[in-house]
Image (cartoon, rainbow, N blue to C red):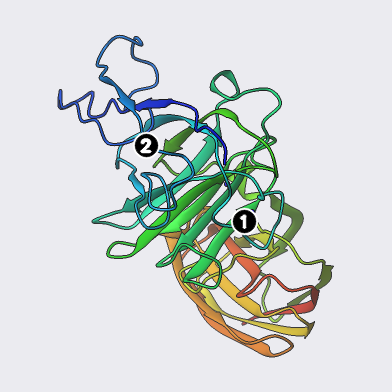
Amino acid sequence: MLGFSPPRASWSLVLGTLLGITSALGCGLRSDPFAPDDAMSDDDDDDSDPGDPNREGTCGNPRLLPTTRTLVTGQLSGPSFEEGWCGADGGPEDVYLLELTQDSNVTIALDGSETDSDLAPTLRVVEDGCSSGEGFTKICTRNLVEEPYFFFAQAGRSYRVIIDSRDGAEGAYGFRVDYDFPSTEQCNVHPELIEQLPGSAFIWNNEFSEGQGRVDSRCGGPGRENMFRLRANYPGNAFALVESSGGFAPLISFREDCSTLTEVDCTSAGPGAVAQLPFFLPEPGDYFLVVDQAEIGSGGYQLRVDFE
């Protein structure tokens, strides 16, 4: 997802439905959102001062996110300690830490039934960092109310998932964490089809304003992008070249499906530079080619894909 008498807040964690393990780690978490509410619960009061910069749920003392499908609930109150580039985050925030032992997709979706109607949380995901200027920001969006967001998490790295709020906002929130493959609809595939034909070339160009994208890559990719479906008709080599302008830092990703876990290869370059990626189509079928950004700047690109 800048004194007062601090309000009393409570949170709980219910984790591990399949293993029958219950742990109180942070704001309310339910490992199986379809299980009855009283299946496994442990409601403990949290008397920490929301104005304490080292309270539980801050960058210095984040709450742990489990690595199973989970519903997280919490209460935002107190001052703001952290802000991101996308704005609408001058109010209180909660910080969660996610660390995985294997690469995975991670989808964050706001749960409207657990979120106050007048609270529109901002979502930020920072890799190997937390505060402004630290690590690599994979997601910074004010649109979590409208749609879920997913990112690629690598084993051995740490991710801070931050639920933030507008200046002066307080209230209850809930979000779901899922580790399944994202749907093709979530990847917002471009309607233009790239079709492999002997000796042919596909050419496309576009302009983007600064902003958050929908998919990422092992090479990065937080900015706006175009994902194309590529239809192979025979085994053969192909070559993609992206020329860019302005603040567009080109990134090319070739993958078998929407998910970054299916990525075969990728490459990136700096703003206004050229990115090139040779790749092989092993058999007929549909693949995906992504023109993405290694940063979030505004600018344009021209894509050319050549087939043997």
The circle on residue 52 is: none
Q: Amino acid at mark 2?
A: Ser
For label 1, the crowd category at 10 Å Cα-Cα, with few meaning under 14, some 14 to 19 and many 20 or more, is many
Against 28, residue 198 (above or below) is below
Q: Nearer the viewer, residue 79 or 250?
A: 79
Q: CA distance from mark 2 to mark 1?
A: 27 Å
Which quadrant would residue 210 be assigned to in this image? Answer: bottom right
Q: Is residue 18 left or right of residue 44?
A: left
Q: Is residue 215 visible?
A: no
**Circle 2 or circle 1, nearest the eye:** 2
CB under 8 Å between callouts 2 and 1?
no
Name the spot of residue 177 as percent of width and height, x first: 43, 37
Q: Nearer the viewer, residue 229 or 24?
A: 24
Name the spot of residue 14 as percent of width and height, x first: 28, 25
Residue beneath disc 1: 140
Q: Nearer the viewer, residue 57 or 96?
A: 57
Q: Residue at x 46, y 30 (%)?
A: 74
Number of numbered tags placed on the structure image: 2
Label 2 element class: loop
Q: Quadrant of the C terminus?
A: bottom right
Q: Residue at x 30, y 40 (%)?
A: 66
Q: Residue at x 82, y 66 (%)?
A: 209
Q: Amino acid at mark 1?
A: Cys
The circle on residue 48 is: 2
Name the spot of residue 199 as percent of width and height, x first: 70, 82
Q: Is residue 87 visible?
A: yes
Against 164, residue 19 (above or below) is above
Q: Nearer the viewer, residue 250 or 75?
A: 75
Mark 2 / mark 1, whichever is N-terminal? 2
Label 1 element class: strand
Against 275, residue 15 (above or below) is above
